[in-house]
Amino acid sequence: MLSLNRLLFTLVLSAISGVSAVQNVKVQGADYVNNVTSDRFQIIGIAYQPGGSAGFTAGSGVDPLSNGTLCLRDAALMQRLGVNTIRVYNLDPFLDHDLCASIFNAVGIYMLLDVNSPLPNESLNPDDLTSSYNSAYLNRIFAVVEAFKNFPNTLGFFGGNEVMQKPGTEGEVPPYLRAVTRDLKNYIAKHSSRKIPVGYAAADVREILADSFAYLSCDIDGSSSDESRIDFFGLNSYSWCGGDATFQTAGYDILVQMFGNTTIPIFFSEYGCNEVKPRVFDEVQALYGPNMTSVMSGGIVYEYVQESNEYGLVDLHDNGTAVIRVDYDNLQKQYNELDIKQLESGNSSATTLKSPRCSGGLITGASFSKSFRIPSLPSGGQSLIDNGIKNPNNGKLVSVRETVVPTEVYGSNGGLINNLAIEPLPEDRSNVPTGADTSGATSTTASGTTTGSKAESTGGAGNLRMNVVLECVTLMILALRVV
């Protein structure tokens, strides 16, 4: 009887402190698909790099996902905004990211993570590929995999970002990009409990864009198990500028035609031209409209934090306070007009597509590499893949016990936002726009439902756990009565 009571007591504790997890999203043909519901997943994302690349320094003990208090604040604002994905560029794989990753998981926000950084020996050098592709570099990118592989809201890893930024880099770089993709996917297959997609984010250099996509997304020797093929393709595009831009003037029609036969997910890994301020984000309706969703899987707005380049949606201050900008309000209004149910509807033909066989005939540019001889692993690389890196920092989900944002946050009109909090979601939900206008000074939770205090907040995940608690208590009482 004691063991039964102990079991029931354990169940109660687990229910109270349990960690809800989003459902994994996988690549299936040209779409992202929820692994459980089979609904299509469209990326409604935002770039998240407080401090910018210049703010990421070796040994500082800080990166965008290392401070739970700040992540709580930002996750609450992102949940209100309606995003379901963040892209994080520069990470220290040996810091503790558990709380931040768990907070974003709790509110149904996935993470797309760059494995490279601007620090020395932590990215490929297009001017010195042979020397920069070494075992120390592989140890770095594998460490990022180790740090984030266990989080269910890890959507994928970028193996490279704009490594080919201009014509002239397309000769030697492409085979090395495939080599890095191969190495990451082989490491994940060996050391992760699930398959995590690996892709590339390209600069919008139209002269080499189509060839970049064709080269990286084909199957060498026609093998569907080719690990050097990317699982997704991101495009950093800023061609839609201001309220006068159109589908045609922005060149979106050309992109749809260029990628019309894609066999992997394609999305804007950055977008949001700021030549006209404040930004109105009219391109959101085009990106998530019928002309593009047949080809594209959404996009990531650049960027969350206002930096010197003036792309931000939110001003952040050293004392932890934040001020929403008009750009945030404008983007939220655009998101609120989206037909989420339509975006989640699947396309059976898109999920069954097979990648083409690699050949020189796929490449149109005279100077673009037509060689599919991928560089061999550098010395020590195979050992890292076979045995894993030494002393990996494996992240894990933890309970998110605090939901109310402790720092002051102000609306774009200068009014204080009262009782700002995250609302944990049930396990089968990712975050979506709510249709609510949360600009200005309000007294709402992240999802827009009125609350007076932390104790009154009853999010979906909280309700589920409470139901489990009640059921366990009932079972315990019945068991005691039997005795």
Image (spheres, helix red, strand yellow):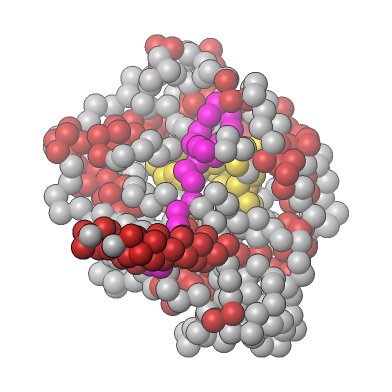
Q: Nearer the viewer, residue 118 or 426?
A: 426
193 sits to left or right of 15: left
| Residue 23 forms part of the magenta stretch | yes
320 sits to left or right of 39: left
| Residue 242 percent across, percent down from the top left | 79, 58
Residue 241's quadrant in the figure? Answer: bottom right
| Residue 119 percent across, percent down from the top left | 32, 59
Residue 435 at least partly seen: yes
Residue at 46% x, 60% y: name it.
471
Q: Nearer the viewer, residue 455 or 275?
A: 455
Residue found farthest to the front: 482
Please, is residue 57 above or below residue 238 in the view?
Answer: below
Please, is residue 380 above or below residue 327 in the view?
Answer: above
Where the C terminus falls, by quadrant? bottom left
Where the N terminus falls, by quadrant? bottom left
Residue 137 at least partly seen: no
Residue at 50% x, 75% y: name it.
403
Residue found farthest to the right: 244
383 sits to left or right of 353: left
Number of numbered markers: 0
Please, is residue 6 above or below residue 159 in the view?
Answer: below
| Residue 245 forms part of the magenta stretch | no
Residue 397's quadrant in the figure? Answer: bottom left
Q: Nearer the viewer, residue 5 or 441?
A: 5
Residue at 34% x, 34% y: name it.
185
| Residue 61 percent across, percent down from the top left | 29, 72
Q: Nearer the viewer, residue 28 or 460?
A: 460
| Residue 228 percent across, percent down from the top left | 37, 27
Which stretch appears magenta? Answer: 16-36
175 sits to left or right of 453: left
Residue at 78% x, 37% y: name it.
290
